[in-house]
Amino acid sequence: MSSAIINSVAYDHQGKRLCPVELDQARAYLQAHPEAFLWIGLHEPDADLLGTVQTQFNLHELAVEDALCAHQRPKIEAYGDSRFIVIHTAERDGSRIVFGETHLFLGTNFLISIRHGPSHTYANMRQRVEARPKQLAHGPSYPLYAILDFIVDNYVPIVEDFKQTLQQLEKDIFLPQYKRGTIKRLYELKRELITLRLASSPLQDIAQELSHGQDEFIHASIQPYFRDIADHCTRINEAIDALNELLSSAIQVNLSLVTVKQNEVVKKLAGWAALLALPTLVTSVYGMNFKFMPELDMHYAYPVVVSLTALACLRLHGTLKKAGWM
């Protein structure tokens, strides 16, 4: 079995796991067992493997082409007797959020999931689904719900991490010392948040379409489960929008505080420049080498001029300090 094939398992009409099925024998198995359905999990398959999948399940070539190139927007499309769904996944990698894609082919008797990029494995989720044969007996629509629900559930801790990170950055904003890394991290956080919004927003529309549509691939008893996903997406999107507004405000506050601090520095420099200008003005008068300056012949002229200049500087210093320029 190829390393890209994670699982290829058949289930009967009672939701019980039957046996693994070779991918190139999928069509023959379904013809021999019309009441069974296949749930196949692939991870970054190559063109040859997807060609086999296309042949066995009669998938549309455009959908297969999209599934091979993992740069698709989240969407749901109908291709004859199958549906093609693209979902963006998200997970934390250290202090960053990384995004991947999951492509899904849904038919009346098969579900094919294709993972691209960073994504949690669906192995544990599959075990939980297999532990509920009553729901699994409704066919591939319940595993489809389980995958979408698993992806949405992974959004929730990421949003919580965003909240905690933002709270810490808000504290850093009001520190006396300016940190260049703070504004950089705020920008990165906003970019990740927007990317997450672009991933979760279409998923809400997809879930609503699956819950309200008259689609033969979605069992009527499973449709309420998709409404639950849509509700979760609504709450996540609202939280993301609120965080996005807070991030925008935090960025503006950070820039405003930096501007205020710069103005304070400029004011202090201007105040000291004024203090230096006063004695410079006085001493420059005596640097013009005029012959007839009465005070030049006075015995106490020098200490008097120095004293008056110092008093003027002290008076100016007091005025500037009172005005907040010193």
Image: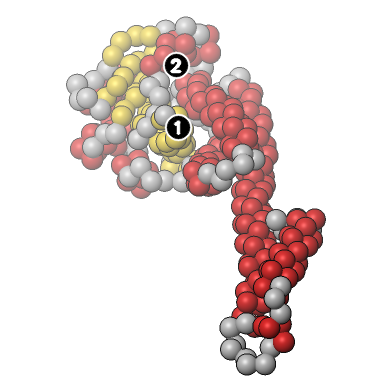
Choose between 100 and 229: the one closer to the eye: 100
Question: Compared to 267, does 243 lie above or below?
Answer: above
From the image, tell me which residue sits under label 2: 125
Assess whether mark 1 and mark 2 are in contact (beta carbons under 8 angstroms). Answer: no
Q: Which residue is at 51% across, 17% downward?
A: 138
Question: Compared to 189, does 23 lie above or below?
Answer: above
Image quadrant holding the C terminus, namely: bottom right
Helix, strand or loop at label 2? It is helix
Side (left or right) of 274 relative to 172? right
Q: Position of residue 50 (x, y in %)?
A: 27, 36
Q: Which residue is at 64% across, 40% downward?
A: 174
- Identify the mark nearer the N-term, 2 or 1: 1
Choose between 153 and 180: the one closer to the eye: 180
Choose between 144 and 120: the one closer to the eye: 120
Side (left or right) of 5 relative to 39? left
> Can residue 230 be seen at all in this image of the molecule?
no
Side (left or right) of 277 relative to 102? right
Name the image quarter holding residue 86. top left
Q: Amino acid at mark 2?
A: Met
Q: How many neighbours does mark 1 have within 10 angstroms: few (below 14), some (14-19), or many (20 or more)?
A: few
Q: How many neighbours does mark 2 have within 10 angstroms: few (below 14), some (14-19), or many (20 or more)?
A: some
Choose between 13 and 309: the one closer to the eye: 309
Q: Position of residue 227 (x, y in %)?
A: 64, 28
Helix, strand or loop at label 1? It is loop
Label disc, if present, on residue 95 of the rendered structure: 1
Q: Position of residue 117 (x, y in %)?
A: 35, 35
Task: Tell me the CA gap for discs 2 and 1.
Answer: 25 Å
Q: Amino acid at mark 1?
A: Ser
Image quadrant holding the N terminus, namely: top left
